[in-house]
Amino acid sequence: MKKSTSSVVKGLLYAVAIIGCILAVIVVFSGDDQTNPTAEAYLQKQIAIRTPIGTTLATSFFEVTATDMARVDSAGKMLIVITATFKNTGAENRSITYGELLVNDGKKDMVFDQAQLVTAGKQPPTPELLKSGKTTQLRIGYFIPAKLQGTLYWRPAGADRNQTIELGDL
């Protein structure tokens, strides 16, 4: 029995389509590490980047440098005061937000995100709007429990989740 020419052509088209799909799957799933990062490569990107105090950390809109850290103990609380310089690297005027203080006790990070400006005057300062290209220095305070032990890190607002400035041990 003879097959018609149209059924032979249909069979060939189906075969070509199936081979094409198989080749596409092979190409998609057989790239190098740059096109298909492994879990290890992904985790390497998540490793904490700890910048030492005095070193500048680039965030979304600011270059931030923590120049000093002081601790003041009082009535069961400890005030951690960070002296930091902010330079607005963006094209627009920006409001400065302070970020988070982290205390690592060797097992986990405890996060403190309630910051306040520390000034010598009696009036609480208003949030500062920093003009493009300008620099300012601020003293930022975080209250934490006095009994905490561990290493202090500061993550300025706008920094990546894995970027911190190491402030030292309590």
Image (spheres, rainbow, N blue to C red):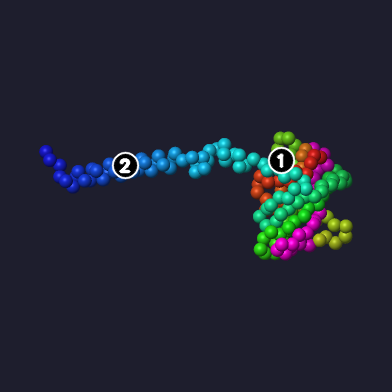
For marks 1 and 2, give the CA distance: 52 Å
- Mark 1 in CB contact with mark 2 (< 8 angstroms): no
- Report whether residue 27 is seen: yes
Q: Does the magenta stretch include residue 141?
A: yes
The magenta region covers 126-149
Q: Please, is residue 65 above or below residue 104 in the view?
A: below
Q: Which residue is drawn at 19% across and 43% down?
A: 8
Query: According to the image, label 2 marks what residue?
Result: 18
Position of 77 with respect to 131 (left or right) is right
In x, y percent, where is residue 144?
80, 45
Residue 117, magenta (yes or no): no
For disc 1, the neighbor class at 10 Å (few under 14, some 14 to 19, many from 20) is some
Please state, as top left, top right, bottom left or bottom right, where the C terminus lies in the image: top right
The x, y position of residue 136, in whole percent, is: 78, 59
Q: Name the residue under label 1.
A: 109
Q: State the residue at coordinates (82%, 48%).
A: 68
Helix, strand or loop for disc 2 = helix
Percent across and percent down for residue 14 are 27, 44
Tell me residue 112's x, y (percent): 74, 47
Residues 65 and 117: in front is 65
The label number, if any, that marks residue 79 in the structure image? none
Mark 1 against mark 2, which lies toward the viewer? 2
- Residue type for callout 2: Ile
Q: Furthest-top residue in view?
A: 106
Count of marks, rendered view: 2
Amino acid on which disc 1 is placed: Asp
Compared to residue 61, the image places residue 111 above or below, namely above
Quadrant occupied by the N terminus: top left
